[in-house]
Structures are given as C-alpha cells and as structure tokens.
Amino acid sequence: MKLEELIKNKKLKFTPARQMLLEIFSKASQPLAYEDIKSQITMDKATFYRNVTTFEASGILNGFESNDKKRYYEMTDKQHAHFICSECHNVECLDEELQFTLKDYKVDNIIVYGVCKKCCA
C-alpha cells in the first residue's frame, strides 16, 4: 500500500511532512528515535512528536520507551520483539520468535532488557 493511501485510509490529512516521516520509518530496519532522524527531516521537534503521536493513535506506528528515556518508533507492520541493553542502551530487533499469550490480553510488543553481546565481551 502506498504511503498516501495508508494516511488517507486512517482518515488523516496527507502532508509532505507526514509523507517524509513515513518514508523514513518504512525504510528503516530498526526502530528510530527523533535523535536518529533529526538530520533527515525539515520539521522541528514539536512537529515530529505531534505527527508520530497521531500515527501511533491511528495504528500506523508502534512506539516504546527505552531505559535511556528515548522513545523509539517503527511501522506497525514490522512488529517483533526488541532487546535493549542496560549498559549501552542499544536497541536491537530480535529475530527469534518470542510469543506468549496472556488470558484476556492482546500483546502488542515484547521488550527484553539485559546486557548485549558487545557489553558482555
């Protein structure tokens, strides 16, 4: 589905800023924080957060906060488990299938905290 269609299907206004953000997130191989993409965008920080909050509310983006107090985002169609290093705060996407069920709950995101390979060495 084209990004313009995705935005309009969620009954949101299609703007160049929203298109720019979704192009960046759709091409990303890992979750991104504002600090990761601020050099690639022309909008200020408030506009960035206003748009990603709208995308989260409409189900286009999934967001989570790491232990370094940064909020990371990724497209909802790329949902999977994440590992966050307690020492270097690196966020990694896990290829392993981590699934479990909780009675009467819907699990959207699994985040595993620990020490990464680099910090263990």
Image (cartoon, helix red, strand yellow):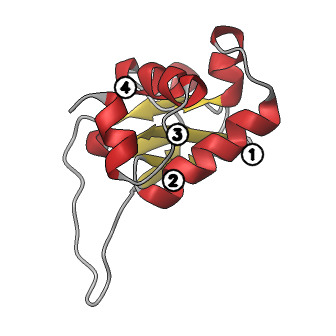
- Which is more foreground, mark 1 or mark 3? 3
- Which is more foreground, mark 4 or mark 1? 4
Mark 4 = which residue?
26
Q: Name the residue rendered at 48%, 35% in the picture.
A: 14
Q: Is residue 106 left or right of residue 56?
A: left
Label pair 4/1, CB-CB below 8 angstroms: no
Mark 2 = which residue?
56
Q: Give percent across and percent down for residue 28.
A: 41, 21
* Distance from the alpha carbon under mark 2 to that under mark 4: 14 Å
* Distance from the alpha carbon under mark 4 to that under mark 1: 23 Å
What kind of residue is marked 4? Ser
The label number, if any, that marks residue 34 in the structure image: none
Of residues 2 and 89, the one nearer the viewer is 2
Q: Name the residue rendered at 41%, 54% in the picture.
A: 11
Mark 3 = which residue?
73
What kind of residue is marked 3? Tyr
- Which is more foreground, mark 3 or mark 2? 2
The correct choice, above or below, for 46 with respect to 107 in the image is above
Question: Tag 1's secondary structure?
Answer: loop
Mark 1 = which residue?
69
Of residues 49 and 92, the one nearer the viewer is 49
